[in-house]
Image (cartoon, helix red, strand yellow):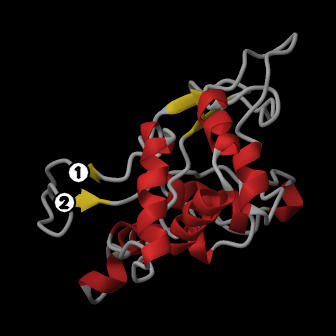
Amino acid sequence: MIFAGEAYNVEQGVTNELFQTERDETPTCLFKGAPEDHTKFNASTATNAVSDVTKFALFMRFLAPPEPAPETPSSARGRSVFSEIGCALCHTPSLTTGRSSSAALSEKPAGLFSDLLLHRMGPRLADDIVQGVAGPDEFRTAPLWGLGQRIFLLHDGRTTDLVEAIEAHASRRNAHFPPSEANAVTGRFRALGDAKKQDLLDFLRSL
């Protein structure tokens, strides 16, 4: 709900019940009372009463996860390499959802390939953005499900090359940041033979 409300306000400029302050507070730009998107208590149906933000949040909550491609001999070997070199330490293949009032979401396996935790990634990926408890070089492990359908990679979309994205996980300490937590894993990736590297890439692109 918070993500939906903030996106409406920041990206679309639509005030809502969660974010009621206009992004542009110039008096001549304030044409409507806040919030612009809200619950409509006098609506004729329950569906029409719900705010757009709530509908958007429900859509996201029940959106099906990305479907991986059918497994091939190469991608099956790549899955083993993924665990062997330590990628799965942070990109946890599957987590189980907590209990939910919705049976569709309650205690279900989610193959998102993330531990959903913050990790220090070193100066190479540091963006100097502090958000919540995340420091300027800390990132939540990006879920890899749907990776095969992505064009731009890493948090800032800086590359379309999967090998370059893996290499960017490695970085040494500098005057401002400690080394990346992924240095050892990236080192093991570099030490792989060409065949194992290709199997790993085929696996990642199958997600």
Do the residues bearing badges 2 and 1 touch, measured as CB atoms within 8 Å? Answer: yes
Callout 2: 10 Å neighbours few (<14), some, many (20+)? some
Where in the figure is residue 136, as x and y percent of width and height? 73, 26
- Amino acid beneath label 2: Lys
Can you identify the residue that label 2 sits on?
108
Where in the figure is residue 192, as x and y percent of width and height? 63, 47
- Amino acid beneath label 1: Thr
Would residue 25 be seen by someone viewing this image from the given angle?
yes
In the drawing, does residue 118 fall left or right of residue 197?
Answer: left
Q: How many labels does the image show?
A: 2
In the drawing, does residue 43 fall left or right of residue 177?
Answer: left
For the point 44% across and 63% down, the residue is 77
Residue at disc 2, secondary structure: loop
Where in the figure is residue 133, as x and y percent of width and height? 56, 24
For the point 73% across and 34% down, the residue is 170
What separation in Å lies between label 2 and label 1 (alpha carbons)?
5 Å
In the drawing, does residue 42 fall left or right of residue 192?
Answer: left
Residue at disc 1, secondary structure: strand
Would residue 56 be seen by someone viewing this image from the given angle?
no
For the point 52% across and 61% down, the residue is 4
Comparing 47 with 68, the one in front is 68
Q: Any mark on residue 142, and which?
A: none
In the drawing, does residue 131 fall left or right of residue 108?
Answer: right
Callout 1: 10 Å neighbours few (<14), some, many (20+)? few
Q: Quadrant of residue 108?
A: bottom left
Where in the figure is residue 87, as x and y percent of width and height? 51, 43
Q: Quadrant of residue 147?
A: bottom right
For the point 48% across and 52% down, the residue is 81
Q: Any mark on residue 96, and which?
A: 1
Toward the bottom, the furthest residue is: 44
> Split into 4 quadrants, where in the image is the N terminus?
bottom left
